[in-house]
């Protein structure tokens, strides 16, 4: 029996725009077990970004329940949400979101600073993880000295370094050419094979197929897709 | 965390060199002018007070104008004052105009001063050669005289005047010394003066009254009390009329100068600190620009787990570091400026620890005050919106 690490029940997210209340997520039910590689497939405007923000604890649901690692995520103080994000989530963004003035290694160390890890340990862990994603030679390079694929690897290393519960990737291949995109997807599959839990948001059905499980989100409603494997 | 923030702040300042420098310029000018003005004023103050103190901080000067009933003070009045406590000595002065003669040569319009030993003990460099008037001369009303430089050179051509006779107002005295040549700045021309014991002057020259006196006080801190006691004696001496004399307490003059210059220093410092505030607004402006430029960085940091207060601290440190660098440069500029000015106008240059603390502390405070609002703005950014603004 796989360990349940994420559970959403009748999750609703509404935004108030002026006088109008806009319902973006209309009762989402979702369960993720440890070791899943879930693709959330949906066109733009479907509510997939909002779903990603809620999974990533950047936002909280209006109604319904969301449990992450057994903890109810609701309207908590920002400090608490910061700690949950730091501990539970490893973000991977479409545009990499690396800090241009910092070396690859310093970028990877960033979440460890907020986790209160000592400089020595930060150094060891970031070096180790950069080696894992194949950038042992590029640790001192700044983002502008790296290719797009390499930059995304740095970002993946940054997401992995805190050993989070979930790797949460938002269109991770969106800014890459097809070949590089494939390489990144291969890395995702390797990580999945190592037992990492991955949630990948994408609009691209081909990319989504890399997941072990696909859910589709259309107009704020989620429907379970077929297993890819 | 703190170390990382300081490092990051320095990196950000260095990567925007021109902008950082221009922003710092406000702080540099502000701190520089405050430090320069305070240092210059305190240097000038110490120079002026030193000069005043060298004139005798422990003296009370009495000028006698006289009343219709009594034209001046008598020896009896002087004795009464000397009986007061806290008086270390009294130097009365009798002044008048006289004629001097030696060996058939005469000089008119000579200033005659009667002094005593107390005056000579408390005043340096009165004579150039010979001896001063001593206690015995004063008590015995000796007919001895100190003569001015011009008198010595005109009446005693080719002779050493000391030990020679001189006729002052028709009475014969012995010359015991020659007065120091007076500088052009001196209020009284000593070159055409003779000084004799004031007791002799009262008896022999026919001067009835003492025109002025300098009273030396033992304990300067009690100067005000002693001055009041002297006033009481003098008012009584002039039969209750306090218009008969004027009294000046050097210590109170010194206190007045000190309080005036401290007000001046505060005023100038206050005006200069306006430029510091303007500099602070510049800092705030730059920090606001920096926050909006780095919105996505702030969003990312928040996504990675940065607490709002950690974001706030980072930007606050950046603003404080910026101000401190500006403050240190400004401090160096201000002190150098003060040093140059002090050397040009010839006043003292004194750099106190409080000035250092003031300069550095001021800039740190400016950094905190004007960095607070931008830092708080950064900390309050919604991470979702911040991440979207790529």
Image (cartoon, coloured by chain):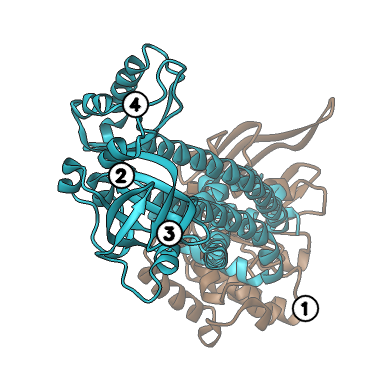
Co-location on one chain, circles 4 and 3 = yes
- The circle drawn on residue B115 is 2
| Residue A76 drawn at (x, y percent) | 53, 35
In the picture, measured across the screen, residue B87 lies left or right of residue A181, that is: left
Give the letter of the chain under mark 3.
B
Q: Earlier in the sequence, mark 2 or mark 3?
A: 2
Of badges 2 and 3, nearer the viewer stands: 2
- Give the crowd class for mark 2: few <14, some 14-19, many >=20 residues within 10 Å: many
Q: Is residue B195 visible?
A: yes
Q: Is residue A162 visible?
A: no
Q: CA distance from mark 1 to mark 4?
A: 111 Å
Q: CA distance from mark 4 to mark 3?
A: 45 Å
Q: Looking at the image, which is closer to me, A39 or A88?
A: A88
For the N terminus of chain B, the quadrant is bottom left
Of badges 1 and 3, nearer the viewer stands: 3
For the C terminus of chain B, the quadrant is bottom right
Q: Looking at the image, which is closer to me, B207 or B360?
A: B207
- The circle drawn on residue B49 is none
Co-location on one chain, circles 2 and 3 = yes
Residue appearing at x 73%, y 68% in the figure: A207
Residue where numbered disc 4 is placed = B73
């Amino acid at each position: 029996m796989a360990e349940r690490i994420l559970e959403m029940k009748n999750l609703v997210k509404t935004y108030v725009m002026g006088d109008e209340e806009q319902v973006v997520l209309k009762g989402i039910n979702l369960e993720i077990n440890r070791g899943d590689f879930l693709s959330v497939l949906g066109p733009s405007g479907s509510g997939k970004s909002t779903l990603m923000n809620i999974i990533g604890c950047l936002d909280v649901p209006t109604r319904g329940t969301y449990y992450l690692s057994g903890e109810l995520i609701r309207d908590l103080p920002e400090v608490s949400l910061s700690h949950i994000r730091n501990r539970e989530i490893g973000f991977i963004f479409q545009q990499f979101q690396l800090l241009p003035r910092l070396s690859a290694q310093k970028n990877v160390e960033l979440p460890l600073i907020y986790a209160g890890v000592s400089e020595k340990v930060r150094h060891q862990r970031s070096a180790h993880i950069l080696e894992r994603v194949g950038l042992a030679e590029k640790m001192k390079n700044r983002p502008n000295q790296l290719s797009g694929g390499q930059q995304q690897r740095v970002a993946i290393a940054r997401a992995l370094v805190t050993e989070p519960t979930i790797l949460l990737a938002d269109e991770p291949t969106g800014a890459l050419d097809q070949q590089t995109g494939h390489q990144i997807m291969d890395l995702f599959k390797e990580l999945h094979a190592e037992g990492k839990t991955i949630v990948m948001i994408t609009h691209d059905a081909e990319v989504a197929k890399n997941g072990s499980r696909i859910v589709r989100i259309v107009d704020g409603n989620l429907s379970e897709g077929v297993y890819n494997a | 965390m703190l170390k990382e923030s300081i490092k990051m702040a320095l990196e950000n300042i260095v990567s925007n060199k021109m902008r950082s420098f221009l922003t710092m310029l406000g702080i540099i000018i502000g701190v520089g002018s405050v430090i320069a003005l305070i240092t210059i004023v305190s240097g000038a103050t110490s120079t002026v007070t030193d000069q005043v103190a060298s004139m005798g901080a422990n003296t009370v000067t009495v000028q006698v104008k006289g009343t219709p009933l009594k034209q001046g003070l008598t020896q009896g009045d002087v004795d009464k004052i000397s009986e007061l406590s806290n008086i270390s000595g009294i130097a009365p002065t009798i002044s008048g105009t006289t004629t001097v003669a030696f060996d058939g040569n005469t000089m008119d319009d000579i200033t005659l001063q009667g002094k005593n030993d107390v005056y000579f003990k408390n005043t340096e460099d009165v004579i150039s050669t010979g001896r001063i008037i001593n206690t015995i001369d004063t008590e015995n009303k000796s007919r001895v005289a100190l003569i001015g430089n011009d008198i010595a050179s005109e009446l005693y051509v080719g002779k050493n005047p000391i030990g020679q006779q001189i006729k002052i107002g028709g009475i014969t005295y012995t010359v015991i010394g020659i007065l120091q040549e007076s500088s052009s700045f001196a209020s009284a021309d000593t070159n055409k003066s003779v000084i004799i014991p004031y007791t002799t002057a009262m008896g022999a020259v026919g001067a009835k009254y003492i025109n002025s006196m300098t009273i030396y006080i033992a304990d300067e801190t009690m100067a005000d009390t002693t001055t009041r006691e002297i006033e009481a004696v003098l008012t009584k001496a002039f039969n209750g009329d306090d218009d008969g004399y004027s009294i000046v307490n050097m210590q109170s003059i010194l206190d007045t100068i000190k309080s005036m210059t401290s007000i001046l220093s505060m005023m100038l410092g206050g005006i200069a600190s306006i430029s510091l505030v303007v500099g602070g607004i510049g800092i705030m402006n730059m920090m606001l620009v920096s926050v909006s430029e780095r919105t996505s960085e702030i969003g990312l940091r928040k996504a990675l787990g940065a607490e709002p207060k950690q974001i706030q601290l980072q930007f606050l440190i950046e603003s404080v570091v910026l101000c401190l660098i500006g403050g240190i440069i400004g401090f160096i500029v201000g002190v150098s400026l003060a040093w140059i000015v002090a050397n040009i106008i010839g006043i003292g240059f004194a750099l106190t620890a409080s000035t250092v603390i003031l300069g550095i502390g001021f800039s740190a405070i400016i950094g905190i005050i004007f960095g607070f609002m931008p830092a708080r703005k950064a900390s309050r950014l919604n991470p979702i919106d911040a991440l979207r603004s790529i």
